[in-house]
Image (tube, rainbow, N blue to C red):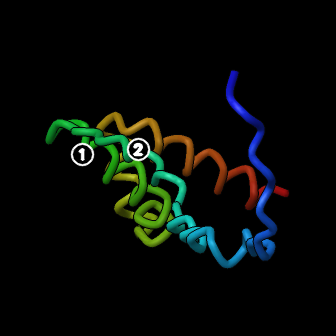
Amino acid sequence: MAAIQPVQNRPPVDLAAAAPAPKPAPETKPPAPAADTVQISSAGQAALHQSLSTPAHEAAETLAQTTKEAAGGDSQARAKLAREEAASKA
């Protein structure tokens, strides 16, 4: 059997100094949301453009132009003439 060896007294070890300093975690940014891509046909673009510009165009046209368009079958022109007639009677 081996003999028991006496414990040698050593100075205490500073564990904080002996351990390497932790590296700061790199800043992580949340991923940017995915951008959806939409392709609109030229006919769709024309319809969109017309629907966005129609109210301003209808408001700026003359009574003669509106009457001409209504006679040609333009339902918006007919509705505008009906509104104007109702407003003038009120």
Taking depth in this image into account, of 59 and 72 the one nearest to the observer is 59
- Give above or below for 25 relative to 14: above
Please tell me which residue lies in front, 45 or 4.
4
The crowding category of the residue bearing disc 2, from other C-alpha atoms within 10 Å (few below 14, some 14 to 19, many at least 20), is few
- Counting every numbered tag in the picture gives 2
- Left or right, 42 with respect to 16, comes to left
Quick one: quadrant of the C terminus?
A: bottom right
**Residue at image x 23%, y 39%?**
40
Question: In the rendering, at what x and y percent does residue 76 appear?
Answer: 47, 43
The residue nearer to you, when weighing 67 against 17, is 17
* Residue 21 % position (x, y): 59, 74
Viewer-nearest of discs 1 and 2: 2
Q: Residue furthest left?
A: 42
**Residue 51 relative to residue 47: left or right:** right
Instruction: Label 1: state its secondary structure.
Output: helix
Nearer the observer, 9 or 68? 9
Rendering coords of residue 3 (x, y %): 73, 34
Residue sitting at x 14%, y 41%: 42
Chain-order first, disc 1 or disc 2: 2
Local secondary structure at mark 2 = loop
Mark 2: which amino acid? Ala
| Residue reaching furthest to the right | 90
Instruction: Say the numbered circle drawn on residue 34.
Output: 2
Q: Which residue is mark 1?
A: 45
* Above or below 76: residue 26: below
Residue 20 falls in image quadrant: bottom right
At x 76%, y 71%, the residue is 10
Q: What's the residue type where badge 1 is placed?
A: Gln
Q: Is residue 82 left or right of residue 28?
A: right
Mark sitting on residue 71: none
